[in-house]
Image: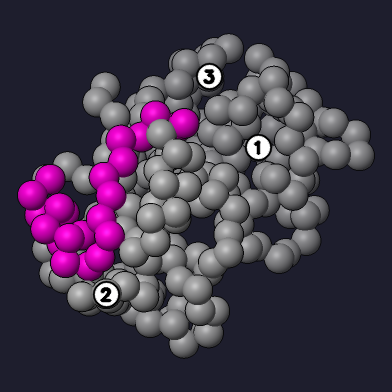
Amino acid sequence: MDRLKILVVDDEDRMRKLLSDFLKIKDFEVIEAADGEEAIDKFFSIKDIALIILDVMMPKMNGWDVLKTVREHSKVPVIMLTARSEESDELKGFEYGADEYISKPFSPKILVARVEAILRRSGMNQDDVIDIGGIIIDKSAHSVKIDGKEVELSFKEYELLVYFIENKGIALSREKILNNVWNYDYFGDARTIDTHVKKLRAKMGDKGDYIKTVWGMGYKFEA
C-alpha cells in the first residue's frame, strides 16, 4: 500500500523539519509548504493528500484563508496549529471546518497520534485489516469480528481496541490511553477508561482476557 501523504504547512523551517521527522518515523510521506500560497498550489497539484497540518499565522496567505479555500473543494482532514490559545480562535477553526486545533508548544508525538487517530476515523489507514488472535478488524468498514462473529462496539470501544492492538505487548498508562484515544487535552476522570475497558472485555467474550490489567498503571494487550 502506498504511503499516505501529509501536507505540513508552516513558515518556520525548524517546525516543518520537526514534524516531518516524526511523521516519517511512522512511514508517512511528507510534503512541505512554507506559506499559504505554496500550500494551496501543492494541495491542488498533488491530488491524493490524506491530511493537512496547517499553521495559522503565515505570510502571503494565512491558515484561515487556506482552510476556507480547501473546504470549498475538499473534506480532507485538517489540523490547525497556532501559537495563540484564545477560545475564539479555536471556535473559528471549527467553524471553518478544522478537524483538530492544537496550540503551540505541543508534543510532536501527541500530534502524530492525533494524525493517526483522524486517519483511522476517516478510514484512510496504513493497514486496512488487522488479524490477531481470532480478532479481525476491518478499519475501512469500521467493523470487528471475533471468532467469525460480528461484534457491535461503540465508537470509543472500537478506538480503544484498535489502540490496544496497535500497541500490543506495551504497558499503557491510563494517561497515555486518554491522550491517544480520548484526545490529547481531555481533562475528565481517568476512571472512564476502566468503565470502557470493562464493557469492551464483556463484548469480546473469552478474548476479553487479552486485555491485561497492569496494577497501579493501566492496561496491556497480549494475544
Q: Secondary structure at mark 3?
A: strand
Q: Nearer the viewer, mark 2 or mark 3?
A: 2
Q: CA distance from mark 1 to mark 3?
A: 13 Å
Q: Which residues are magenta?
A: 25-46
Q: CA distance from mark 2 to mark 1?
A: 48 Å
Task: Choose the circle earlier in sequence order: 2 or 1.
Answer: 2
Q: Is residue 150 visible?
A: no
Residue displayed at 27% across by 74% down: 59
Q: Quick check: 206 above or below 110? A: above
Pointer 3 residue: 135
Pointers 1 and 3 in contact (CB under 8 A)? no
Q: Quick check: 199 above or below 70? A: above
Pointer 2 residue: 59
Residue type for callout 3: Ile
Q: Is residue 123 visible?
A: yes
Q: Which mark is residue 93?
A: none
**Would you say 170 lies left or right of 22 here?**
right
Where is residue 148 drawn, in percent x and y?
Answer: 46, 16
Q: Secondary structure at mark 1?
A: helix
Residue type for callout 2: Pro
Location of the N terminus (image quadrant): top left
Q: CA distance from mark 2 to mark 3?
A: 49 Å
Residue displayed at 50% across by 73% down: 83
Location of the C terminus (image quadrant): top right
Q: Secondary structure at mark 2?
A: loop
**Would you say 165 lies left or right of 13 here?**
right
Where is residue 218 drawn, in percent x and y?
Answer: 80, 38
**Would you say 181 lies left or right of 152 here?**
right
